[in-house]
Structures are given as C-alpha cells and as structure tokens.
Image (spheres, helix red, strand yellow):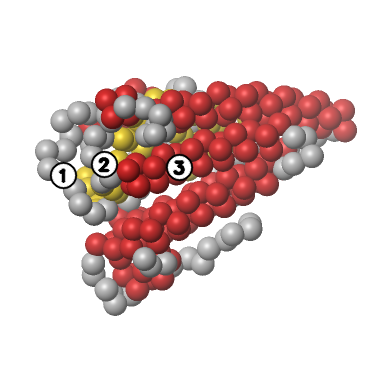
Amino acid sequence: MKGKQDRFNGDSKVLHRRAVRTPLLGEEAERGFHEAMMAMADARERKADLLADPDVTLLDAYEAEFDQFVESVERRFRHISGEDFKEAAMAYNRGERNDQTGALATYYSEGLWRIQQRTTITDMLFAPLILRYPDSFTVNIRFANGYTTQKSIHYESPEHSSENLTEEHAETYYEESLYSQRRAARYLRETAQIIRDEFPDPDETSFEERKYGGIVAAGGRRGSVFSTMLERVDPAPDRFSEPVTESTLVQEGPEARRTERELLFDGEFVY
C-alpha cells in the first residue's frame, strides 16, 4: 500500500482502555482542532466519492483515507512536540527515552499501524471515539475482535472474494457489490455531516454551542464483506475535574463503555 509504514515493534497494551487528552487553550488551538475534524469529514466524503466510482478499487478508497489520516496525525504531533512521531516512538520502544512525548508517539504509531492492516486482516474492528470537552478533547483509538456493530451497514468487495463463480454469477455478484458500495458511499456522505455538526467552526459559533461534542465510528471486514458506522456521542460533563496544559495519555472515560454497550460490538475490545 502507498504510505506503508515500517513496523516499529510496539506494544498493543499502550492502546488498551486509554486515550490521548489534548488541551484547547486559546483561539489557535480551537481552530486547529476544528480544522483536523473538518479534514476528517473531507476524507470521509472523498472516500464516498471513490467508493461510488466503479473504476476505483475499494483498496484505493481505503488507501486515500489512510494517507489523509496519517498526514493529520503527523502534522498535529509535530505541532505539539516539534518532533517526528515515528522517530520518537522507535526511541521510546528501544528504551532510549521515557517521557510523555515518547509515550504519545507510541500510542499513535501503534494505532496507525493497526489501522493500516484493516484491508488485509479479517475480523478486526477499528472503533475510534473522539470527544470534545470545554477545555480539551480526547482521541481513543480502539480495536475489537469482530467486524461489525448492530448499527453498521455492509458492502461487498469483489477483490477480496475467494469464491469461484460462473461467468453469469460473477457478473451478478459484481453488480450487486457495486450497488452495496454506492449505498455505503451515500451513508459516508451523510455521516460526514455529523462530524461537521459536532465540531463547529469556533469563529462562527459561541463557546456554549461548541464546548461539548463527540463521535464514535466503527469499520471492519470479514472476508469480502466490509462494515462502516458513525454516530454522535454525548460526552460525560463530569469526566475531568482538573485542567490539562499539554497532551497526555489518560484512561478511557465512561463514554467508551457506554458506546460498547449501546452498539453491541460483535467482539470484545482487545486493544
């Protein structure tokens, strides 16, 4: 895949039941967070366009989305720390450093490497949770055994199918797969708007309108069947009692367990 990363031999335990909390101190931070969320919405709409195009493979659609996500993480990490997160993660895992920046880099690197495997590994569900609070936001990178939720929609990828079909059945299967991808594309466009609604422009909204917001998403694969889901989440207003001045790893909040129960993930969270 384009943009493929070297494996840095991290530890999946760094992801388990943890999130990154980042402060929102001042107008620049607010705008930076909003821009990152809009880039996520743009990437979702771009993926929708590619899925709806019969001349573009599903792998190309996922690759474009992943490249945008990597670019966003790299840009934000460099803005926060002034460092390259891949190099910081490798140094942290070699035992050459033991600081918060290295721990954050390891969290992101482990997450990105696993996200990249989604099209090659079956029964691994990626289920990120992003929450906005008055003075900060959290990003929880989660993975579960399984491939879907009770609210996911599904679509087929002929290039991932191992079925030996007759010419007639193969043509029917291909057309049905394209239909399912167009349906998924419509869903992706609709849910991209949820991202825009939950994280509005700080220059166009009051603090009261934007101080809370949240989304949970999920995507996975079983064989040739892919799944996708995204919906809004209400952050717990009493989650944090202390302010934060720099990005740090924190334990997941009650919203994480709540979304697991409400969406009834078909597998247990393992990372």
Q: Among all residues in the image, which is located at the extreme bottom? A: 96
Q: Position of residue 102 (x, y in %)?
A: 30, 65
Residue type, mark 3 in image: Glu
* Depth check, front residue: 148 or 185: 185
Above or below, comparing residue 65 to residue 196 in the picture: below
Residue sitting at 62 percent across and 38 percent down?
A: 47
Callout 2 amino acid: Ser
Residue at 63 percent of width and 57 percent of height = 1
Reading the chain from its start, which is encountered first: label 3 or label 2?
3
Helix, strand or loop status at disc 3: helix
Q: CA distance from mark 3 to mark 2?
A: 15 Å
Q: Given the image, on which type of amino acid does mark 1 rest?
A: Pro
Name the disc covering residue 136, or none: 2
Q: Secondary structure at mark 1?
A: loop
Q: Are marks 1 and 2 in contact (CB under 8 Å)?
A: yes
- In the image, is 188 to the left or to the right of 129? right
